Image: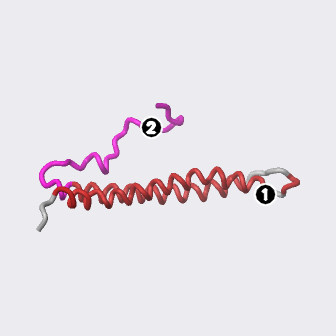
Amino acid sequence: MTTAPGLPDAGRRAITELSGIEFTGSLGEAFYIYGKALTALADRWSLELDIAAVDAEAAMTTMKGNKLLFGVDTKIRARRVAKRLKRARELAAALADRGERFHRTYVKHFTPPR
């Protein structure tokens, strides 16, 4: 896996917020903590990707396009490129939702009915 120059090798680093949670002892409590940590991490990613999409689109919109089109072509291309980050944001939001469901699903399938 290659990374951008000047950045650490992101493929080899652990996500400390999640890897520090041990699945020992009370699994229900551990899964609850893990789900909350996963949700928080995904929410942060979602916010970062949303900001990056807006910033990237604004930066690309300032570029010069075809003179005859008065920059409309640049705005359209910028929107297309920024859409990739917006889709990534949606994936992060879905991951946050799955983090919330993780503990509930464990409780549903592994705790005895009362």
In which quadrant of the rendered view does residue 43 lie? bottom left
Q: Residue at x 20, y 57 (%)?
A: 109
Which residue, given by chain and number where applicable, does mark 2 sit on?
8
Looking at the image, residue 103 sits to the left or right of residue 66; the answer is left
Residue 28 percent location from the top left of the image: 18, 57
Q: Are marks 1 and 2 in contact (CB under 8 Å)?
A: no
Q: Is residue 20 magenta?
A: yes
Number of marks drawn: 2
Which residue, given by chain and number where applicable, does mark 1 sit on?
72
Amino acid type shown at disc 2: Pro
Q: Secondary structure at mark 2?
A: loop
Residue at far right of view: 68
Q: Residue at x 65, y 56 (%)?
A: 57
Among numbered discs 1 and 2, the one appearing first in the sequence? 2
Looking at the image, residue 48 sits to the left or right of residue 20; the answer is right
Q: Residue at x 44, y 55 (%)?
A: 92
- Establish if 7 lies above or below 57: above
The stretch in magenta equals: 1-30
